Image (cartoon, helix red, strand yellow):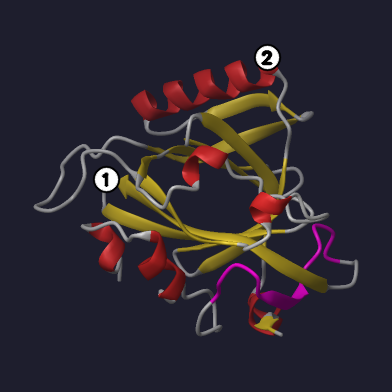
């Protein structure tokens, strides 16, 4: 169920009241505290995470619209859910050369509909998808995938310690912004890579897919 974001954007007031369904939690909004957030290392203990922003992306694949719910947490962490799976990711700050390299890898993957990233962070990655333009738009759909921030922490603009978003600030207007992404898995480490462009810049996150027990333990404080 893509929901109301498939054909219409939400203004910020409405979006703040909207329910962003994530796993078994009824709703998630900026300012909430999520308990039992898994660590990048599954052997480390779980902890709490403060929600800095929530967003939803709609990626148009060959099979149709693929909704991706995003929860931007403190400590540069990102929780995402898509296709019934969840992942915990950490922001990766790209160098200029790395950004150019991944951008070219993504462009190549779009044309091939598959691909391998030969070397990034010391490993080879298998590209699982690269989405952006809506090749066969259905009635009411946009011609490009998009991302929309739904809620923002009230202290985000007040320079409060620890309240920092890893999203581009150009996304904070509550509007729909064009979205281009690449998703990849590392066979050696089982790490997951999400690389996307929206709001005027590229974002890069690396983490891992959560198992069902980890996903189900998370709850709003």
**Badge number at residue 62:** 1
Give the percent coordinates (x, y) of residue 135: 21, 37
Main SS, magenta residues? loop
Residue 183 lies in magenta, yes or no? no
Give the percent coordinates (x, y) of residue 158: 70, 52
Magenta-tinted stretch: 28-42
Residue denoted by label 2: 97
Comparing marks 1 and 2, which lies closer to the viewer? 2
Residue 41 lies in magenta, yes or no? yes
Q: Is residue 191 visible?
A: no
The residue lying furthest to the front in this view is: 158
Question: Quick check: 83 left or right of 202?
Answer: left
- Residue 215 vs 196, above or below: the answer is below
Residue 180: image quadrant is top left
- Nearest to N terminus: mark 1 or mark 2: 1
Neighbourhood count class around disc 2 (C-alpha, 10 Å): few under 14, some 14–19, many 20 upward? few
Label 1 residue SS: loop
Q: Residue at x 68, y 16 (%)?
A: 96
Disc 1 to disc 2: CB gap under 8 Å: no
Cα separation, mark 1 vs mark 2, equals 30 Å
Neighbourhood count class around disc 1 (C-alpha, 10 Å): few under 14, some 14–19, many 20 upward? few
Q: Residue at x 30, y 71 (%)?
A: 1
- Residue 43 vs 138, above or below: the answer is below
Question: Quick check: 130 left or right of 77?
Answer: left
């Amino acid at each position: 169920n893509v929901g109301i974001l498939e054909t219409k954007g939400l203004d910020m007031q409405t979006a703040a009241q909207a329910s962003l369904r994530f796993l078994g939690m009824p709703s998630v909004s900026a300012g909430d505290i999520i308990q039992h957030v898994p660590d990048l290392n599954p052997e480390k203990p779980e902890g709490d995470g403060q929600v800095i922003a929530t967003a939803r992306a709609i990626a148009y694949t060959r099979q149709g619209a693929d909704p991706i719910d995003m929860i931007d947490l403190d400590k540069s962490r990102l929780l995402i859910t898509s296709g019934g799976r969840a992942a915990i990711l950490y922001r990766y700050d790209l160098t200029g050369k790395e950004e150019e390299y991944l951008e070219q890898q993504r462009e190549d993957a779009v044309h091939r509909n598959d691909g391998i990233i030969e070397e990034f962070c010391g490993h080879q990655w298998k590209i699982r998808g690269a989405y952006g333009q809506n090749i066969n738009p259905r009635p009411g759909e946009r011609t490009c995938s998009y991302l929309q921030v739904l809620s923002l922490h009230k202290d985000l603009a007040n320079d409060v310690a620890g309240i920092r978003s890893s999203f581009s600030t150009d996304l904070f207007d509550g509007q729909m912004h064009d979205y281009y992404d690449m998703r990849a898995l590392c066979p050696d480490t089982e790490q997951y890579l999400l690389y996307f462009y929206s709001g005027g810049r590229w974002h890069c996150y690396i983490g891992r897919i959560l198992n069902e027990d980890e996903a189900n333990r998370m709850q709003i404080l």
